[in-house]
Image (cartoon, rainbow, N blue to C red):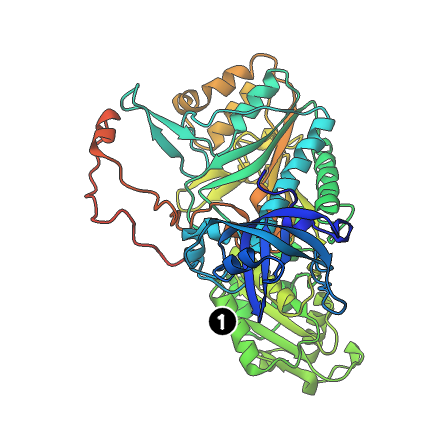
Amino acid sequence: MLKTINCGDVRSEHIGKTVTLAGWVHRRRDHGNLIFIDVRDREGLVQVVFNPEQAPEAHKTAESLRNEWVVQVSGRVSARPEGSQNTGLATGEIEVYAEQLFVLNESKTPPFFVNEESEVDELLRMKYRYIDIRRPSMRDTLILRHRAVKFIRDFLDERGFLEIETPILIKSTPEGARDYLVPSRLYPGRFYALPQSPQQLKQLLMVSGIEKYFQIARCFRDEDPRADRQPEHTQLDLEMSFVEEDDVLNLIEELYTELVETVCPDKWVLKPFPRITYSEAMEVYGTDKPDLRFGMEMADLSEIASETEFRVFLSVLENGGIVKGFKAPGCAGYTRRQLDELTEFVRERGAQGLVYIGLTGEDGDLEELTEEQIRSSAARFLSVEQVKEIARRTEAEIGDLILIVAGPKGSTNQALSLLRNEMGGRLGLADPNLVAFAFVTDFPLFDWNEDEKRWDAMHHAFTQPKPGHEELLESDPGSVIGRQYDLVANGSELASGSIRVHHRELQERIFSVLGYTRQQMAERFEQLLTALEYGAPPHGGIAPGIDRLLMVLTGKDNIRDVIAFPKTQSGYDPLFEAPGYVEPSQLQDLSIAVTVEREATNQPIEADD
């Protein structure tokens, strides 16, 4: 080894000892005769002192050092002089007096600072990701990711799970996002697909008698851009035989509780995990991935709205819409500008507008509310008694602001849910150290696709209906509830899972509801359907995303910040300039003809991320 100890591991107990360090020049300071260099490696940094009287050759070399040069330093560990200790640094009580210095490699001036957490354009960070990862925030995120994945592996190994790898090159069986296709040279005109998930493979492992399987799986989905998506992502894939829903949920609750308490001891978990049905989540939070770190629960105000003279409310209700709202505590004094900002916020997210009611005044009894205390964009159309009833439904008090959206159910829930999260952030209601896990259960098995006039699977096509709901598959698909569940935390969906279908006949009935013909079933799913005829056990599982978990644990709002080498939101890799063109000879080997004319540059026009 070129070093005897890590830079970040030098401590007071090493005083008087000679150590050899190797790392990067983090910062250089010249104080007259003495030169101070902070040397950094993965474990941290330590201050090295170059004294021309003690080590003239080393001091002379140190005069030429620049940030990010790679060096090897040998010297004696000493206590820092009284008053010069750095309590904010793990090595802050000591320093190393250099005796020898060797430059292992010089560095060009980096495109951005490594020794400070300044704002840097994301494309530039991704172009020079190998430099970006040197920065403490990225380094610490990748260390945390390693520890989290290691914890998962150890936890499941102790409980009898087998880690089994499944193929990356499989058959295209699109049932969600688009597949990434891989052409075959040996079978011209045929294609492999990269797996969107190992769904059928893990079910086949249950038929194989494995009983407890897991995998840290790479998954590939050609999805439309979104801030919390990547073309390739990592998930914990997990499947168990002879289980009910509670068996899976209890295991995941134990796993994630212990994981957070072990790898993020500064955070705390809401225990036990709340279990909320899908219908309850949509009614109270307007979303199936609620942030439970704060209240501001929604109330359906449609009944009260129907009794008002407000034409906006009445028109929405006549057209089958809803009126919902929630209170923002202590915000009755919001300025007109602030209220206009909130109105624009919901309009940009699908709502037609925002109705607000401010209950102004000092603390007082809601029952004594007067007309003068009501500040509302709909004040002319609401009686004092109606405002009081709206306040009761939303649990608002004097000093609170009630925010109301009226419109179609889907867009109203979406806009209000996003507004709730926005207000929770503005008001600082969410404890940043709380990880509020929750299970959302009892999802509808099917979702009506209005554009294509057909049923889609709410999660996927392999979910078992709840007992008693099988008989509704053909007669009333929209009312069928599935044995499926999500794990959510802090407003993000972290996992989806279900109890799977383990009888061929039932699986074929579900495929039929989704519009598959017998021929399509055979082409896409025959391997699974046949396996279900050979003694398939009852089984179920879940697939938590590793990337989104790290987003929650680190408080990041961008999935790219928790992945070592990510793609941009539009799926482009600035580091390798991928996707790129290939040589005509490669296409010829694959029997592929490209109809798009090759551009002069390999780099596509980058969309605004």
* Label 1 CA crowd tier, 10 Å (few <14, some 14–19, many 20+): some
As drawn, is 193 to the left or to the right of 552? Answer: left
Classify 392 as above or below 281: below
Could you tell me residue 552's position as x and y percent? 62, 51
For the C terminus, the image quarter is: bottom left
Q: In the rendered image of this protein, does residue 309 appear above or below residue 504?
A: below
Residue 227 pos. (x, y %): 49, 53
Residue drawn at (54%, 33%) of the image: 217
In the image, taking residue 130 as reference, residue 6 lies left or right, namely right
Would residue 396 be found to the left or right of residue 123 on screen? right
Q: Position of residue 122 (x, y in %)?
A: 45, 58
Q: Residue at x 59, y 82 (%)?
A: 335
The amino acid at mark 1 is: Glu
Q: How many marks?
A: 1
**Is 545 in front, or is 505?**
545
- In the image shown, does 294 or 124 lie closer to the viewer? 124
Quadrant including the N terminus:
top right
Residue tagged 1: 344
Give the residue displayed 72% in from the left and 38% down from the top.
255
Question: Which structural element holds mark 1?
Answer: helix
Is 61 placed above or below 171 here?
below
- Looking at this view, name the residue that lies furthest to the right: 365
| Residue 467 location (% of width, % of height) | 67, 30
